[in-house]
């Protein structure tokens, strides 16, 4: 492989290099506008329960990795010796999550961590522009991408402190990438190692391209650099061997997974985290290529992924390899955070209401379910039917690549990648909750928050949204605006419009005008428009919902209120041990991190029957919506005080076999009661570390009931 000569690296020398014949790129070098443009990081801050979730991350493992966890503290990126793979992606992932966490919380300690890492990494930038510890043929573009995503967020959140430095380093790096790509695709399509290591950069290239788009959209770079960046986007995409638009086509896409072995040639499209990231790929590419066919590709990707491989919690069944729907399979935590982020991106890029509902679904369920209450423990994989989360290394695994450590909660169960990647989940969600619309602001992903921003040509607006949503149906907005503007409130796809309302109270108390409106929504975006006058106003928005039992494979159902999945409360008992390193699942765990006594592995077991069939016609709300006191945390497990909202349902125990002593078999069809009717509690899935979320059904009112004489029994509540 050729080594780059120093002269080839001088920017002036580049013009002499041959340029690729650029394929179908639009001659129109303007990025297609967002449907709803995102706000800069730091403009939206969490309130209420959402703030509680973020604070828990800050005081949990995420907020302390920099102090003691070798892959961060002793990272090769900082002159140390550690990383978990030659991709050197651990510190970049950590940085991508900690920047938004630090700035969303405005936490001085965490901001200090990200500032010192950013300063050190950029101080070490090579003379030729390379960012990262690799030299020569070890250079691989992929590992940089999460770091660049973190840097762009830092530049957004702290313009005076960081934007200039970050943009300067990014442009220098992009000039080098231009040279490497023209030089046969070094570090991108030409890699020294196993071909998989080169495939990461290609199948995830849209994330890199989104960084380039950020530079084009948010900075004033010179004409030649701009031209270079447009060429680079296209060159990256054209030379990628793994384009999601090719995969999301009839015939090629695997609705049923043909070969779940990681060695199969379609593996890059089946790798769980790749699938999560890939959902936004075509929408990113469309922004620069202007090709409208990519909208269809996006829809195919989202619809097929969730129809054939989706979990009830809004993520994707997959360990390292995507699987067909089965509640004993599992879904990786990193896949959940990437999926949630992609879906939020899709709402901003394309504006279709269902993307926003899917984003909320993933983030309100698949993310919190895999974190312990104090967030010191996280899972690698969550099963939708998971009555225990125990170390079962002596049992056969039902997963493809994961073992009996996959469902425990800990420091680095199975793999260490999620340890660094999960912290981005909540903070990136918050950053995407509000967006710009042409004439005002959109509340896109509903949740408690305060937004402080300026609307172009209209001036400053501060809006505080107090709510327990998604655990309650009411959102109260206190608005202060320099001039009138439009407030767009998203009405979820499951909302019951006839029972929902929007009420605007404005002006001083004496002359207040009061308007009660029914909700009128735009069919595509799901938005209700309200004209807000200058000055102070209040809006009370009520979104009525019904309890829903949605069909799942094996004739089972999953139960929802709005975007919250409810699961059978199976009770919960927890034990813990010293944490195990990912390469040593046996033994008692490591003493390395004893100074951090909360750093442990955690094991959960059920304390009530899990082998239950329910009669969905008996589902009813109990303490729902919640009383007016606002929640401090959203997802409180039973050990930590219990969730704030629950449902009740009638059902009975059934015979339900267990596979290899490891997990419940698929829900039995046409089950028969082996006990009398009982009333069971269902709690938010995200709060339930052990749970049953895909349940078989029985009909209890009528002659099908197995043992009517025993009557109702409230004993299991
Ligand atoms: C280029 O694309 C932008 C964004 O869609 C559009 O506003 C503009 O009119 C286009 N320009 C030309 C010359 O087609
Ligand atoms: C912005 O970054 C600078 C440099 O790291 C730092 O001194 C300053 O406190 C940061 N500002 C905010 C608001 O965090
Ligand atoms: C909103 O942001 C502006 C500019 O940063 C600041 O001056 C103002 O105090 C903020 N207002 C509130 C209510 O936070
Ligand atoms: C988990 O709980 C069940 C039911 O109480 C019990 O039979 C089983 O032994 C427990 N498993 C462990 C490892 O504690």
Image (cartoon, rainbow, N blue to C red):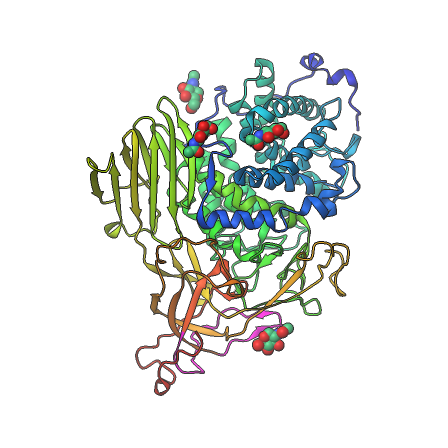
Q: Which residue is rendered at x = 64% and y = 39% of the image? A: 95
Magenta part, dominant SS: loop
Q: Is residue 324 left or right of residue 565?
A: right
Residue 238 is at least partly visible in this image: no
Q: Quadrant of ligand 2?
A: top right
Q: Is residue 687 magenta?
A: no
Quadrant assignment for the N terminus:
top right
Instruction: Look at the image and tell me in which quarter the C terminus lies.
Output: bottom left
> Is residue 675 rendered magenta in the image?
yes
Pick the residue in front: 67 or 445.
67
Residue 91 sits above or below residue 574 on the image: above
**Would you say 396 lies left or right of 509 here?**
right
Instruction: Locate residue 709, reporting x and y percent.
Output: 35, 87
The residue at 45%/72% (across/down) is: 669
State left or right for residue 255 relative to residue 542: right
The image quarter in which residue 147 lies: top right
Q: Residue furthest bottom?
A: 709
Image position, residue 638 (x, y; %) = 51, 65
Give the residue furthest to the front.
510
Q: Is residue 610 left or right of residue 624?
A: right
At 55% across and 55% down in the image, what residue appears?
317
Frontmost residue, 208 versus 107: 107
Q: Is residue 55 above or below residue 553?
A: above
Q: Answer yes or no: is residue 587 visible.
A: yes
Quadrant assignment, res 624: bottom left
Work out whether 466 lies above or below 577.
above
How many marks do you count on the picture? Answer: 0
Percent position of residue 302, x then y = 47, 46
Magenta extent: 655-679
Where residue 390 sits: x, y (%)? 63, 67
């Amino acid at each position: 492989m050729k080594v780059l000569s120093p002269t080839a690296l001088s920017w002036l020398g580049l013009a002499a290099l041959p340029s690729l014949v650029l394929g179908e790129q639009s001659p129109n070098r303007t990025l297609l506008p967002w449907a709803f443009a995102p706000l800069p990081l730091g403009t939206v801050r969490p309130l209420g329960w959402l703030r509680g979730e973020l604070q828990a991350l800050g005081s949990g493992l995420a907020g302390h990795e920099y102090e003691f966890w070798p892959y961060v503290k002793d990272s090769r990126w900082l002159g140390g010796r550690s990383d978990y793979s030659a991709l050197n992606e651990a510190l970049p992932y950590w940085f991508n999550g900690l920047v938004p966490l630090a700035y969303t919380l405005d936490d001085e300690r965490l901001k200090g961590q990200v500032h010192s890492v950013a300063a050190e990494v950029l101080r070490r930038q090579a003379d030729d522009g390379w960012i990262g510890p690799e030299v020569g043929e070890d250079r691989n573009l992929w590992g940089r991408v999460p770091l660049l995503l973190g840097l762009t967020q830092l530049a957004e959140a702290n313009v005076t402190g960081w934007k200039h430095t970050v943009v300067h380093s990014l442009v220098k790096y992009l000039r080098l990438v231009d040279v490497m790509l023209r030089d046969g695709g070094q570090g991108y399509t030409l890699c020294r190692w196993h071909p998989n290591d080169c495939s990461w950069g290609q199948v995830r290239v849209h994330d890199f391209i989104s960084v380039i788009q950020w530079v084009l959209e948010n900075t004033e770079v010179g004409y030649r650099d701009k031209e270079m960046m447009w060429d680079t986007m296209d060159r990256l995409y054209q030379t990628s061997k793994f384009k999601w638009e090719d995969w999301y086509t009839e015939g090629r896409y695997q609705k049923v997974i043909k070969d779940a072995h990681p060695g199969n040639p379609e593996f890059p499209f089946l790798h769980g985290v790749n699938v999560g990231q890939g959902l936004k790929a075509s929408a990113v590419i469309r922004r620069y290529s202007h090709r409208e066919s990519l909208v269809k590709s996006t829809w195919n990707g989202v619809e097929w992924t969730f129809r054939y491989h989706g979990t009830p919690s809004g993520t994707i069944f997959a360990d390292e390899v995507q699987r067909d729907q089965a509640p004993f399979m599992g879904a990786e935590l990193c896949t959940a955070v990437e999926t949630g982020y992609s879906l939020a991106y899709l709402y901003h890029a394309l504006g279709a209401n269902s993307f926003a509902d899917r984003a909320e679904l993933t983030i309100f369920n698949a993310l919190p379910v895999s974190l312990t209450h104090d967030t010191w423990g996280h899972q690698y994989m969550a099963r939708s039917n998971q009555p225990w989360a125990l170390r079962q290394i002596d049992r056969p695994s039902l997963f493809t690549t994961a073992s009996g450590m996959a469902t425990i909660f800990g420091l680095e169960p199975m793999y260490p990648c999620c340890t660094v990647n999960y912290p981005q989940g909540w903070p990136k969600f918050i950053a995407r909750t509000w967006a710009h619309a042409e004439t005002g602001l959109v509340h896109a992903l509903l949740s408690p928050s305060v937004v402080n921003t300026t609307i172009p040509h209209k001036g400053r607006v501060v809006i505080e949204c107090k709510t327990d949503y998604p655990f309650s149906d009411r959102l109260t907005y206190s608005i202060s605006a320099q001039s009138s503007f439009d407030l767009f409130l998203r009405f979820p796809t499951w909302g019951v419009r006839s029972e929902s309302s929007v009420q605007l109270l404005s002006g001083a108390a004496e002359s207040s005008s009061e308007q009660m409106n029914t909700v009128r929504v735009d069919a595509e975006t799901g938005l209700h428009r309200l004209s807000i006058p200058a000055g102070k106003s209040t809006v009370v928005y009520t979104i009525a919902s019904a309890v829903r039992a949605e069909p799942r494979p094996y004739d089972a159902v999953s139960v929802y209120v709005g975007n919250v999945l409810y699961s059978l409360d199976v009770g919960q008992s927890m034990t813990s041990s010293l944490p195990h390193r990912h390469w040593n699942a046996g033994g008692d765990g490591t003493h390395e991190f004893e100074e951090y006594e909360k750093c442990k592995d955690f094991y959960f077991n059920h304390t009530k029957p899990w082998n239950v069939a329910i009669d969905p016609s008996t589902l009813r709300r109990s303490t729902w919506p919640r009383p007016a006191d606002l929640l401090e945390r959203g997802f409180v497990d039973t050990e930590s005080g219990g969730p704030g909202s629950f449902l009740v349902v009638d059902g009975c125990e059934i015979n339900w076999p267990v596979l290899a002593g490891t997990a419940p078999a698929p829900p039995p069809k046409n089950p028969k009661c082996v006990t009398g009717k009982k009333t069971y509690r269902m709690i938010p899935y995200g709060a339930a570390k052990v749970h049953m979320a895909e349940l078989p059904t029985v009909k209890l009112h009528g002659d099908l009931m197995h043992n009517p004489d025993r009557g109702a029994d409230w004993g299991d509540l």
